[in-house]
């Protein structure tokens, strides 16, 4: 069974790489091709974490069964098969929302599959390998896609349809996967169960509560700058699609792939709080370096290499933290708590970034982002009981 899970996890990510490259350009496509307002760009960015509030219900009550897990993967790609005929920004936003709900809802299932069927060392290696394959793929496809979009910007519609087809094909690999949940909660408990679990964990587990606060602050620092990035690239740096792809996907992918093996080793050796402190400090540097790109354009590429280094460790910590904190108990409630926290943060932080940009400028927004990351790192490193309470 471990071989089946490993194969499904790796190849489902590999087949989805071209689609993820396209998805990463969606805010820029909306701003550059549909000429939407910055507020609508902010809405799209906010929807990514906000959909987590609905995703927690999907993960808790549907995705635990194999047939629903397979259905989740299928449905999230199907709307994009028809993007060749899309001419409305709102259609794009709705399809993106459906995709994010189903994607976030299915991730806890992978976490539980890893915990139940794989040794801890194999969990770390497999997750890192899957992400490394994904980010190595983003060193090839973005340049090709960027050049195609520079040649004919309208090709984004066809490219979305073709890459979604590969995502649909990955569904076949998930058919042999086992169920992860032994029972489904009664219907009367379904509405409030994720919130009840989250409040119980936050109240009774000060170690996880501190971790969550620190990680939420660090993530807020990166999220608050997201609404200004399309404007920063298109209007201030005046980058072409190819130049943007090199920064956002290629440089980030190279940084991610280079750092992944080192992060895996550190995750085994360091308490999760110290590990996450290093991640938050890298996040703190990203907006500061990006500001310098206004005067020295190639610093943008340096910033995104650093972003890739950071994200490699961030995803390892974030997705494996439920297993680390749950110890021998079921990890799903911890995963749901993570998801709900991300959703609540997404209801506020992107709009804060948009407001700061309206009142000031992109530099101020990025400085505020760095400050959030610094605060998060201080929360994580100052938790003295980390080594005793959680051994990653």
Image (cartoon, helix red, strand yellow):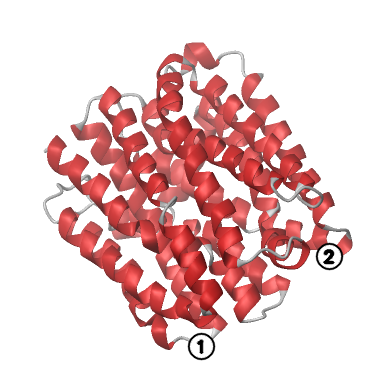
For the residue pair 183 and 187, the one nearer the viewer reads as 183
Q: Give the position of the C terminus as an image quadrant.
A: top left
State the residue at coordinates (60%, 75%): 30
**Inter-mark Cα distance, 1 to 2:** 28 Å
Q: Position of residue 263 (x, y in %)?
A: 46, 26
Asked if one can make out residue 286 in the rendered structure from this viewpoint, the answer is yes
Q: Nearer the viewer, mark 1 or mark 2?
A: 1
Circle 2: element type: helix
Judging by the rendered image, the residue that carries numbered circle 2 is 358
Quadrant of the frame with the N terminus:
top left
Q: What element does badge 1 sit on?
A: loop
Q: Is residue 15 above or below residue 82?
A: above
Left or right: where does residue 30 sit relative to residue 288?
A: left
Q: Position of residue 192 (x, y in %)?
A: 44, 54
Compared with 103, 152 (above or below) is below
Work out whether residue 355 or residue 265 is closer to the camera in this orientation and state it: 265
Circle nearer the N terminus (1, 2): 1
Say which mark, if any, is on residue 87.
1
Q: Position of residue 29 (x, y in %)?
A: 57, 73
Q: Position of residue 322 (x, y in %)?
A: 40, 34
Q: Residue at x 25, y 67 (%)?
A: 168
């Amino acid at each position: 069974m471990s071989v089946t899970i490993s194969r499904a996890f790796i190849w489902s990510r590999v087949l989805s790489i071209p689609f993820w490259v396209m998805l990463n350009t969606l805010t820029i496509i909306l701003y550059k091709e549909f000429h939407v307002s910055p507020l609508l760009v902010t809405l799209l960015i906010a929807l990514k974490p906000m959909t987590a509030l609905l995703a927690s219900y999907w993960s808790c009550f549907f995705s635990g069964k194999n047939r629903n897990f397979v259905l989740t993967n299928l449905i999230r790609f199907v709307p994009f098969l028809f993007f060749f005929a899309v001419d409305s920004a709102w259609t794009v936003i709705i399809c993106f929302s459906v995709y994010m709900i189903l994607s976030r809802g299915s991730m806890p299932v992978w976490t539980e599959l890893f915990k139940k069927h794989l040794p801890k060392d194999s969990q770390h290696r497999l997750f890192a390998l899957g992400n490394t394959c994904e980010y190595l793929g983003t060193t090839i496809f973005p340049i090709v896609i960027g050049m195609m979009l520079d040649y004919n910007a309208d090709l984004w519609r066809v490219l979305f349809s073709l890459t979604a087809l590969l995502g649909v094909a990955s569904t076949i690999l998930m058919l042999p996967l086992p169920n992860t949940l032994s029972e489904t909660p009664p219907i009367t408990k379904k509405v409030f169960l994720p919130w009840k679990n989250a409040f119980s964990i936050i109240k009774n587990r000060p170690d996880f509560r501190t971790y969550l606060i620190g990680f939420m602050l660090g993530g807020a620092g990166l999220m608050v700058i997201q609404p200004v990035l399309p404007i920063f690239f298109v209007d201030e740096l005046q980058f072409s699609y190819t130049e943007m792809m090199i920064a956002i996907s290629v440089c980030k992918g190279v940084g991610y792939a280079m750092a992944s093996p080192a992060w895996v080793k550190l995750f085994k050796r360091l308490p999760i709080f110290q590990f996450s402190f290093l991640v938050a400090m890298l996040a703190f540097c990203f907006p500061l370096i990006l500001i310098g790109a206004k005067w020295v354009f190639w610093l943008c590429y340096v910033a995104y290499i650093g972003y890739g280094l950071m994200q490699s460790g961030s995803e390892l910590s974030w997705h494996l933290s439920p297993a680390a904190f749950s110890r021998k108990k079921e990890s799903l409630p911890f995963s749901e708590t993570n998801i709900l926290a991300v959703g609540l943060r997404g209801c506020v932080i992107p709009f804060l970034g948009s407001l700061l940009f309206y009142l000031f400028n992109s530099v101020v927004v990025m400085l505020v982002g760095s400050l959030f990351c610094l605060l998060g790192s201080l929360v994580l490193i100052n938790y003295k009981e980390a080594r005793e309470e959680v051994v990653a």
